[in-house]
Amino acid sequence: MPDKIPLLRATASLIVSFFIVGMPSVSVGKQDSTHTKPYLPDHPGIAPYPVVSGGAFTGKPVSASPDPLVSYVWTRESEELQVYHLKPVKVSTETAPSFANAESALTDDCFIKVNGEGSIRFDFGVESAAWIEFDSPDLSGEVQMSVSEYNQPAVVNSGPQSPHKTGVPVKHGNTYRLELNAELYEGVRFGWIHVTRFDKPWHIKNIRLVCQTKPVNYAGHFESSDTLLNRIWYTGAYAVKLNLLKDHMGAILVDRGDRHSWTGDANISQGVSMVAFGNYDMVKHNLQRTSVDNNSIESYSLLWIHSLLDYYYYSGDEAFLRSHLATLKRKIDHAAQVTVDEINLGFYGWDERLGAGFETPNNPENRHAYRLLYVQTCVALSKALATLGEKGLSADYRQLADAKLQEIRKDPSWFGAIGLHAAAEAVNGGYLTEDESKALVNKHFLDTANIISFSPFNQYFIIRALANSGLHQEALVAINRTWGGQLRLGATTFWECFRPEWANVIQPNDPVPNGQHGYTSLCHPWSSGATRWLSEEILGIKPVSPGFKRFQVIPHLSNTLGAVRGDVPTPLGTIQFDIDVNQGVAHLQSPSGSLATVGIPKMGKQIRRISVNGQDVYPNRDEQDPSYANPTEDDGFVYLPDLPPGTYRIAMEYGGRGTKHPSPDLKKRIDNAVRLVSVDSTTTTDWMAHYGQDGYLLFDHPDTAVNEGTLPGYIEKIAWKSEGTGAPRLGNWQMKDGRSLAILATQNPMACYQTYYIDIMAQPEKAYQVTLRTAELDTNGKFVIDLFDQRTKNLIHPTVLVKTSGKARYYTFAAKGPVRIRLSHLEGEDAGISGIFFQ
């Protein structure tokens, strides 16, 4: 075991210091940089793909979209990638005399004169799949370039070709291009030029981001009276679009060593693709490509089945479903074994309650969730195969579902033992009794703090469960916190992981905390599920039978969300719908070959009258007129069934005041079972005078592997993962006075070792104070501390930021009962502590 925690490479530290230390910064450009205009050059230059062509900017501009090409319409979509350029929307430097005329980078006539060493940063306004380059006729001295998804030069975990997204550009004539991997592209919003050695003045011309794109049109649209929801829809669609590659759907932009297709991630990407782009052929191709690979994650095989069924219901492609009947049987047979044998699940999600990814993937919650997902999958297969006329197979899968459910229900209180994520799987299966559903809703779905999953991927299945429980307003609160929270922190694509509490510790466009997933990706299409959810639940358009031969339009609105309009592409043509309950009008255009059922929301009021194309249909309908079927109704909607293809104007008159839905309570946070009492930066080696009166734990030298200290009687033990993925390491911290101190620290930059937990197994209901002495391994680093209930794994304290200064600090918390403490790296070296004290 090494004696010292290794330093980050000096090069990266030097480049960061260029931008942190120095002269007062100069910054010019647009403050609102989300509406970036693309530039289509006459020639691709040294790019490996042609310039965007085959269409024009004839689509409707969409202010809610971060996509520079949102209004570009290709007349013929192509499999080949194309490129476009982005100019910076903002330029900043802390060495202003070194870069004369820096503001010219924002114009069509960039001509920056370099007069000395230093760094200049360019903000291109939006995340892109891109690389950075510039022209110079007279470059002299030495330069490096950097790219990043956030406002500092990026560093990721070990594994990829270039963990540090900084390098010497490759010269191609007078063009200098940063080439970090064989595919060129990275996830990029910010770029830098670092002048590391200066000998004489020279010039920067035409700084640009070269962005790759798959030629695909926005066939779907979404617009509501809530502008944040509009931004969420288009941001999710854009994140998926950025990851559409030539022959498959990618799962991450930044190259950190795992940039390949992930079968379960694609469940979200493929669903969003069909809603936003209608690119059924590519979804079909990706399904075929991933049909034999579950990435060694058992739930991903079941999610592949759901992806296949999603494609079937959206496309109506019976032949493709039939071609995979043997695949389905093989996957279900294996899944049945997983539900009874202790087969390694591999992964279920990054949330603490799901074992924090690869850290503890086989915990009880994941076992419960997998079994309930298995039942859900068998039920879904049974229904789909019935539409194919496969009555025998349909009955077989239903029998499998019933048998497993009967086994689960042998314990009549089974639903009391499961957590939030397993509850979502159960609710989404549609097989629960009324009592079971109520119990799960009351236990899990009404807590606005812990309804949030650390993985927006898993959050999608939770908001689906909320909708299936009739809790659309609660789902909108979760959407606001999860996806809206990212936008408020500057996101232009959605992140791999997110905690709303991060807003307390980082500023917009700052680096974000890392975790068991490694360095956090800021463009992860698996996090785009809200886009599909908004189309299906707020706009309300879903297929009822395969291929949209029958479909429903059931918009879920409220007093704070009174209008929505949008399009959904289908094989039969585009469905267009809009409704404004305040104006009392809706419009539907449905394609040939379809039948629609439209739900008119009651809004908690009495609906006095509904007319369709000027003809009354509710509550009084002309029984002699066969034009429209009899409406039906329930507590929430009046349903207009079996509307044939055509164009409809629906008018409704409301009476009464209606039910008030409260605005989303964004201030609702955690009921703190833990409280931060103090942060002490003055105590040094005389800690015994202040801390540890009840007991303490110091981490001894790793050669002895013995922990020095005496624990108080109310602490049964202190535990952490001793080996395997996510385990911390014991190491020596070399102090400034020459002494060494043993620490427990993350194993950065190894992938998946950017975080670790410590379980403090206190007596239940015992109140106490616990102090962590941080091991601050550098002078400009950051890490975060999160605290959880050790039993439920629910978050019980907002994220705490630790800014390192090279000097230990003491963080004291008032706690009660067993607590899990998680330390996660953010910037700099490792996150670590050198002692735990009780008083």
Image (spheres, rainbow, N blue to C red):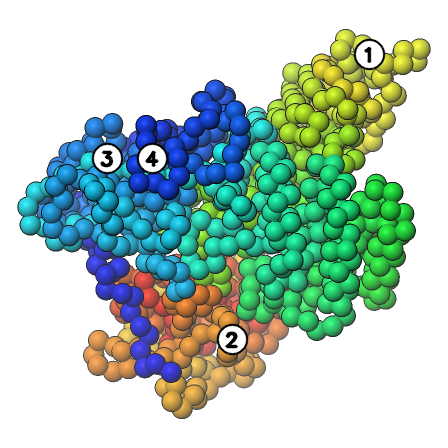
Q: Earlier in the sequence, mark 1 or mark 2?
A: 1
Q: Quadrant of the C terminus?
A: bottom left
Q: Which residue is under mark 4? A: 44
Residue found 30% across the figure and 36% down from its top = 45
At a point 53% along the width and 45% down the height, the residue shown is: 247
Q: Which residue is mark 3?
A: 206
Mark with earlier residue (4, 3): 4
Q: What secondary structure is found at the residue carrying circle 4? A: loop
The amino acid sitting under disc 4 is Pro
Mark toward the start of the polypeptide (3 vs 2): 3
Label disc, if present, on residue 98 of the rendered structure: none
Three-letter code, disc 2: Gly
Q: Which residue is mark 2?
A: 724
* For residue 314, side relative to residue 46 (left or right): right
Q: In whole angstroms, how far apart are the C-alphas of marks 1 and 2?
A: 68 Å
Q: CA distance from mark 3 to mark 1?
A: 63 Å
Question: Disc 4 vs disc 3: which is toward the camera?
Answer: 4
Q: CA distance from mark 4 to mark 2?
A: 47 Å
Secondary structure at badge 3 equals strand
Q: Helix, strand or loop at disc 1? A: strand
Q: State if disc 3 and disc 4 touch (CB < 8 Å).
A: no
Determine crowd level at label 4: few under 14, some 14-19, many 20+ residues with C-alpha closer than 10 A. Answer: some
